[in-house]
Amino acid sequence: MPDTPATDVIGRVDALLKESRRRYPDALATAGRLRESQHGRQLSWPSWCWPPMAGFHAYLTGKGVFPALELGRVTALTLWRLGRGVYVPDTEVADNAAGTLHATTSGGAAAWDRAVLLRVQDWARLPEWCCYLSFPSGFERREDVDAVLAPAGVFVHLEHDHNTGRPELRLLLDIDGTWDNLIPIPVYLDRPTLGAALADAGAVTQAVQAGHIGADVRSLAGPTRTDAVSGLIAWNVLPLALSLIDPDARFAGPTSPGTVPAPAQRHAGGLWKPAPATTQWNITYRSPGPHLKLVPTM
């Protein structure tokens, strides 16, 4: 049988959405208008982005909110609200994804920085604008890590940096179901390895803190000790994200066989409406329909 999340997973994620709506009730409507004004204002971004986080940055600063950590939180929760999919890979799928990632390097977690990243074209197969992933109950993490390095779940979406044009895989860690412990990690997808991607992210953060907003920085020094913390976290959660784009896996939902998740589309009149409820999808290698079950004879 497919693994299922703990009974409180959907409730926990819905509570995060409720908190997001309390803090930023007009975020979805504002972002939807930006999405629809893409051509009218001669703005442009790839089809896999909905829309760039620069729009959410302007939204937050317009409210007098210092973006920092809030930018990653409000972006992910707003995008997730469009589809509200909670994804749980079967243990077999998660183990296969972990093996695929870990096989690109040697030395285990100590060599996380040499893990090879897929291209943005591969990540564009994400089933929704933003997905929430929960660890399957039987998944054994390959390293002994504490709770921060192995969170309860993670929001995953793509980002097009409007200032530099660089593609990013955005991870928002759900540590304990509280808003203040949602931790964003950006992973640049135009770099070949996880170490190079996070070193760039660290260098960009330093440039922004120095007042160089929109700087396109490529690190030559490699990841720092601070980057290593994000690297170990990414090492542990990337198998979940990879399971979303496994070409051999399928999504099993609560409705009839053959139903699959898909990115939300605008409604009549150009409106972007939120999904009415949260849906759980299992990621599995099993085909739909009845399966042979072996029963030991007496």
Image (cartoon, rainbow, N blue to C red):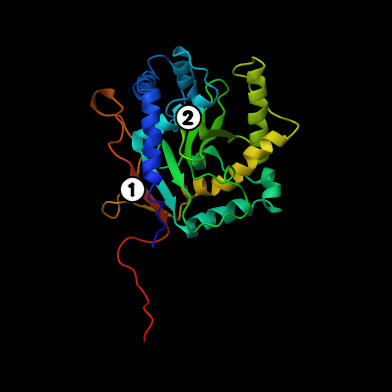
Q: Position of residue 70 (x, y in %)?
A: 50, 25
Circle 1 or circle 2, nearest the eye: 2
Give the residue displayed 49% in from the left and 19% down from the top.
Answer: 57
Q: Position of residue 184 (x, y in %)?
A: 54, 33
User: On the image, which quarter does residue 100 sit in?
Assistant: bottom right
Reply above or below: 242 against 213.
below
Determine the secondary structure under disc 1.
loop
Q: Nearer the viewer, residue 197 or 164?
A: 197
Q: Nearer the viewer, residue 35 or 130?
A: 130
The answer for how far apart the CA atoms under marks 1 and 2 are is 26 Å
User: On the image, which quarter does residue 25 sit in?
Assistant: top left
Q: Nearer the viewer, residue 129 or 153?
A: 153
Instruction: Report which residue position mark 1 lands on.
Output: 260
- Which amino acid is tagged 2? Arg
Reply above or below: 149 against 21.
below
Quadrant location, the C terminus: bottom left
Q: Position of residue 12 (x, y in %)?
A: 40, 41
Q: Nearer the viewer, residue 138 or 285?
A: 138
Give the residue displayed 36% in from the left and 31% down from the top.
Answer: 18
Give the residue displayed 64% in from the left and 51% down from the top.
Answer: 104
- Which amino acid is tagged 1? Val
Determine the secondary structure under disc 2.
helix
Instruction: Report which residue position mark 2 lands on.
Output: 73
- Left or right? Give the position of 234 relative to 60: right
- Left or right? Give the position of 169 relative to 212: left
Who comes first in sequence, dot 1 or dot 2?
2
